[in-house]
Image (cartoon, rainbow, N blue to C red):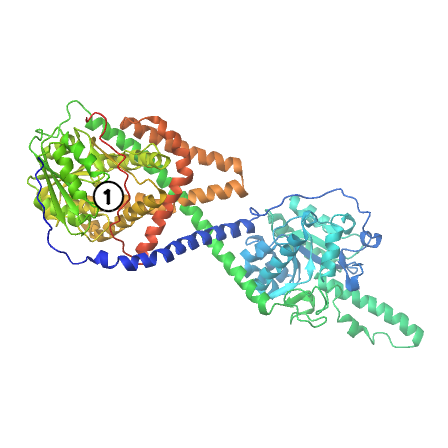
Amino acid sequence: MATTTPSRGRRRAPSRMTRAAGKAAALQKPRVILALLLLLALTSVMLLDGYLRAEVGGDERVRSNASSSKVPDKVLDGGPILSFRGGEAQSQSVPEKTIALTFDDGPNPTWTPQILKILEANDVPGTFFVVGSMVSRYPSIVKDLVDQGNEIGIHTFTHVDLSYQSDDRIAREMDQTQLALAGAAGITTTLFRAPYSSEADAIDNYSWPVYKKLGEEGYTSVFVDTDSDDWKRPGVSKIIKWATPSKNKGASVLFHDAGGERSQTVKALGTYIKKMKAKGYTFTTISGAIRQGNGQNAENAQSGQAAQNGQQPGSEQGEQGEQAGGVAPGGQQGQLPGQSGQAGQAGGVNSLQAAHRTATGTTLYEGKALVAAVAVAEWTVPGLATGLAVVGVAVMGRFGMMLILARRHYRQRNKRRFSWGTPITRPVSVIVPAYNEKECIANTLKSLARSTHPIEVIVVDDGSTDNTSEIARSAAESFGMTNVRVIRQENAGKPAALNNGVRSASYDIVVMMDGDTVFEADTVRQLVQPFADPEVGAVAGNAKVGNRDTVIGAWQHIEYVMGFNLDRRMYDLLRCMPTIPGAIGAFRREAVLAVGGMSEDTLAEDTDITIAMHRQGWRVVYQEHAKAWTEAPGSLKQLWSQRYRWSYGTMQALWKHRKSLTDKGPSGRFGRVGMPLVVIFQIVTPVFAPLIDVFTLYSMIFIDFKAALLAWLAVLCVQLVCAAYAFRLDHEKYRYLLMMPLQQLAYRQMMYLVLIHSCITALTGGRLRWQKLKRTGEVGTPAGVG
């Protein structure tokens, strides 16, 4: 008959953890929301950065050789400047012996500043058709460009062929570039040059509606009549030759300040300017060319009218010359963002920048917000990419270290001559803390009844409300166990239950197990043998998932074998074991009492006491032959709850023992070796490990699906190799590894979120209490026990 010793124990005041439980529960929802907001922010930043680099929403289609039957001949045969004043298409050429230098695809942090220096040194303005995404990334260059007196035109936001795009996409390309200009330089513009455009006679039936639509909205489209072809990098002399107009004609000359290596452009530009000045050419912006052309037209018209009416030429020239032809009058339908509403108003800029408008109101603030968001993305994404590289190296390094050290550990511990010392045969105490374990406690006691090592069993019922203690007494009696004591105490938590058991233990070695765990017949004997070494103060056993035949159970089985037990081999060999699992661990009773027993300061009392024993100079080892079968959480909700407590408790324990980093001598080994490894591999690396999945998914969707998939499969193969080796060491069946790809897709992401949630809880100062998981009792006595 089982010996039972009822004891209500001393009434305890609510612990600090219990008092804070209500507050912690109230804070959980905000923390989850904060974690989701962080994930959303990361996703948004990556999408913005991808959009800026044309990885998101990019379109590389370029139309060529299309018909131009719908384009008016006067446009095809006209000059490079096309406007729609009054809804009527009007073409204009650059006046004779005048050059409008235009630069496409910028700004670029390398080439644009060099070109600006050359223009400034030669007192020559230029017109820069900028890409909005580049403007938002390099706003200071654009501001310098405008302040120097150069003119800005739009070259779309992502450099796409607009003839392929919908009206909404065209509007976004234009509006977003205007916002970028507003945020960078406080202006908007009415000039536009389409990507992949050339001379006016290349306008086709697909691009004509785009120019017409934008013209009706007030944009002036600018083409090229003299192309330097500098993008071909033909050499400085050819660039100068191809950029030179023939027969003293005026020209809109195309150069590039971005889009590739532009050193030849920089070298050619200064020489070209000097050559053309020597030929009597003047340089202006597109607006300056329009103004000069309008002035000549007005002068010619005035002269003709004066000849008819006897008027003096030039009396109306000033008034008409004030109009910067092709610039949409403010206040008309299609008014551009930031436009002042004043006809011909140039926003306070000089006459060579007549296309500019001062950005005000909503446009200005939205523009600044866009530039600020891009600045965040420009810093964040490269930082994340660097973090990804570091995480990747750390993960691969960890795998390599685990494989090497685990193999060495296995060979060392399985030598025929290996011995811990004189075999331990004296009785030990097995402590079973139990709270509402009616489904499992009988199986637990049944497994202990078959133990091949002499034991006493102490079941500490921590205020159960489901008759756990009565079931334990009945089970002990039915199994003929006379070595069982059942102790009742008011609910005080698992650490208090374990401490009660340690104080009540009769022997100098105590084995601790959970109330939902079953031992094999030889488990206790194997577990206590390392105590033959007087330096050993604690032993970690080999915890196995008993309910592994479900999807969630199989995932945890893989994690236990690979993540926990392979890790423990490594830590054992390095003599810095961080955790004795609650499901199966053994301690010298004197060592437990010397460190103050199980602490209630953290949720991970097992990690807490393990580190404490290291700091007292005890050696902690792993005994892979001592196996315990535990019931893993059966639902995602319970799994989240368990791992959340584990992760947060580990952080608490590490913080509590942070001074171990400065411990001296043998007792400081954990601080010197174990603490950094645990922080790097169990906190820092897992927190940033989602970057691998995020960047992989991002690459699959927006960059190169095949390459990203192959990279992901390569990492999976490395993990499979490690898992297979771990399964081999533990003599497990390989068929469970078939679940590993799915585990990587679903289970691992959940564990990442749990850890991030725990980090947020730790940073916000939250507390949690010991949580009870729902059990089914499906893990019975292991095969071979009875």
Find residue 476 and report its image quarter: top left
Q: Is residue 408 above or below residue 599?
A: above
Report the quarter where the N terminus lies. top left
Q: Is residue 86 left or right of residue 752?
A: right
Image location of residue 427, percent across then percent down: 7, 34
Q: Is residue 194 left or right of residue 95?
A: left
Find residue 152 and report its image quarter: bottom right
Q: Nearer the viewer, residue 442 or 601?
A: 442
The residue at the far right in this view is 308
The amino acid on which the numbered mark 1 sits, given as a three-letter code, is Gly
User: Which residue does the image show at 49% across and 50% down from the upper left?
Assistant: 46
Find residue 97 and report its image quarter: bottom right
Visible residue check, residue 349: yes
Q: Nearer the viewer, residue 110 or 196?
A: 196
Image location of residue 220, percent across then percent down: 72, 60
User: Which residue does the image show at 16% across and 28% down from the upper left?
Assistant: 522
Image location of residue 528, percent across then percent down: 13, 33
Visible residue check, residue 664: no
Q: Nearer the viewer, residue 16 or 80?
A: 16
Q: Is residue 319 left or right of residue 39?
A: right
Secondary structure beneath dot 1 equals helix
All told, the count of numbered labels is: 1
Report the quarter where the C terminus lies. top left
Q: Is residue 302 above or below residue 92?
A: below
Other-residue count near label 1 (Cα within 10 Å), few / some / many at <14 / 14–19 / ≥20:
many
The residue at the far top in this view is 416
Q: Nearer the viewer, residue 46 or 771?
A: 771
Residue pointed to by mark 1: 674
